[in-house]
Amino acid sequence: METGSVILLVVGMYLFISLLTGLIPALRISSSVTGYVAADRSMNVLILYFVIGASIFSSFAFLGGPGWAYSRGSAAFYIIAYGVTGIIPLYFFGPRAWRLGKKFGYITQAELLADRFDSKTMSVLLSVLSVVVFIPYLTLQMKGAGYVLNVISEGMIPEWAGAGITYLVVLVYVYFSGVLGVGWSNAFQGMFMMVLAWFLGLYLPNALYGGIGPMFQAIMDAGHTAMLQAPGLTAGGTPWDWWGFSSAVVVSAIGFSVWPHFFMRSFAAKSEKSLRLSIVLYPTFQIFLIPILLIGFAAIVLYPGVEPADSILPFMLMQLELPAIVIGLFCAGTLAASMSSGDAILHSAASVGVRDGIAKVVRNPLKDTTERMLIRLLVLVIGLIAYYFAVVADISLVALLLASYGGVAQIFPVVFAMFYWKRATKAGALSGLIGGIAVNVLFLSYPALKILPLHEGVYGLAVNVLLLVGVSLLTRPDEPERVVRFTSS
């Protein structure tokens, strides 16, 4: 059997196992919306650990991470920098959300915020924001899957077909199993990609240079010292300034814990203890980024000029004289990184879109069966929209992620105020959220307007906090009984 056929056979077997792993939970969840969206609040530590970890580390880590190390050097360390600190707020937010969810039936982030500030507008606004930032994030995952299958098939499978094949599998198990299918598949995919990441990250520097130290020495000897000097390079190859690097870290760290699909896992936990333990263990998942970045550094000297940079991992695998079955396993690991985030994003986007958007604008309350059906339909619609952008868009994977983080980071001040500032009012929260989003979009669209070369999300956060505090102090306090429910939970 030819090498390409063996690789595709291995990848096909991986996709089939992922499909089965995702479909089996459909047999045990209830037919309610709570079962579909929050797994009947039954996730244990193991499933939560992989849902939290694998749903964040995705194509941007497995493909974008090596791509940045390969093309921008030390700039890639921003990924580790924000991941170290970004989980911390969830240790405080998560248990509060879990307690409130268990007591009052919340299963989404927007339900919490809308109830605290007594605002349907807040719910609909967060629904729209979540879906808007989810689409480029999901697009990122699909583009990653397309890259992998295109490269390993040596162009026989176009990127559009690779993305379509992979995400057809994701669509099927998310459609039928909901969040528990996401959890089980994430556990399988997470273990799979962690093992392969460590093997590849240690094997490649040793096979190509004789070790990690000699690899970095070879990079310096070849005249690429700028790649090893913090904060690395820009996309254009010029030195990245500390304004850009540090602001990218800050915005990503702030947005990390309030991603709606990430935050929503708080409601799915079996207990408060399970949630806290999963969050404490989470940094061990972060460690696998180290070998991921070593893969990109290993390609700098030996494989110059590969475009797009995000495809450097599958490109390297095809250049090495490895057994076909091994290459197939590594490519399947890359697909695992894409799918483990894509399924969580797809499920959460549809859940938020219906429960916090559509359900709030229709005149009569939705029946449980109707709501579940609408969520499933939106799974299909959002999947198709993201697939369209994955096929036609030409933008780096990490750039897509950074653009999404600027928008989602605007949720953080409102979440913080919900739990910790009694004086925050509905008018202040809405003003801050709308103002922050508007400023973020303005500077994202017109970067020349920036006074300092900071990530646009920083400007949005500054306006967000000023409006939240200022308008809250100028308006009448919210109902004390409602406020105490959240600040004393």
Image (cartoon, rainbow, N blue to C red):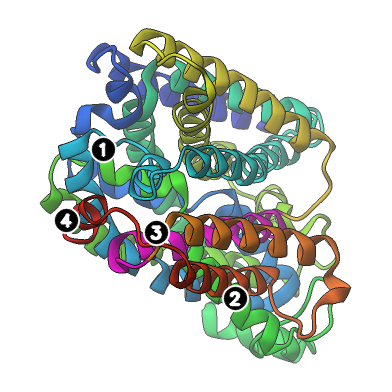
Residue 268: image tag: 1
Asked if the residues shown at circle 1 and circle 3 are in contact, with their CB atoms under 8 angstroms apart, the answer is: no
Disc 4, SS:
loop
Nearest to N terminus: mark 2 or mark 3: 3
Q: Is residue 18 above or below residue 47?
A: above
Identity, as a three-letter code, of the amino acid under mark 2 = Ala
Residue 141 percent across, percent down from the top left:
61, 42
At label 1, counting other C-alpha atoms closer than 10 Å, the crowd grade (few under 14, some 14-19, many 20 or more) is many
Q: Quadrant of residue 118?
A: top left
What residue sits 71% from the left and 28% below the top?
385
CA separation in Å, label 1 and label 3: 19 Å
Is residue 406 rendered magenta in the image? Answer: yes
Q: Contact, CB < 8 Å: mark 1 with mark 2?
A: no
Q: Which residue is mark 2?
A: 462
Q: Residue at x 64, y 72 (%)?
A: 297
Instruction: Check disc 4 and report the residue beneath it.
Output: 489
What segment carries the magenta color? Answer: 397-423
Secondary structure beneath label 3: helix
Percent coordinates x, y for residue 171 in the rendering: 54, 21
| Mark 2 neighbour class, 10 Å CA radius: few under 14, some 14 to 19, many 20 or more | some
Answer with mark 4 or mark 2, whichever residue precedes in sequence: 2
| Residue at which label 3 appears | 415
**Kind of residue indicated by mark 3:** Val
**Which mark is first along the chain, 2 or 1?**
1
Label 4, label 2: how far apart the Cα atoms are:
28 Å
Crowd rating for badge 3 (residues with CA inside 10 Å; few <14, some 14–19, many 20+): some
* Secondary structure state at the residue bearing disc 2: helix
Label 1 amino acid?
A: Ala
> Which circle, 4 or 1, is nearer the viewer?
4
Task: Tell me if I can see residue 343 in this picture.
Answer: yes
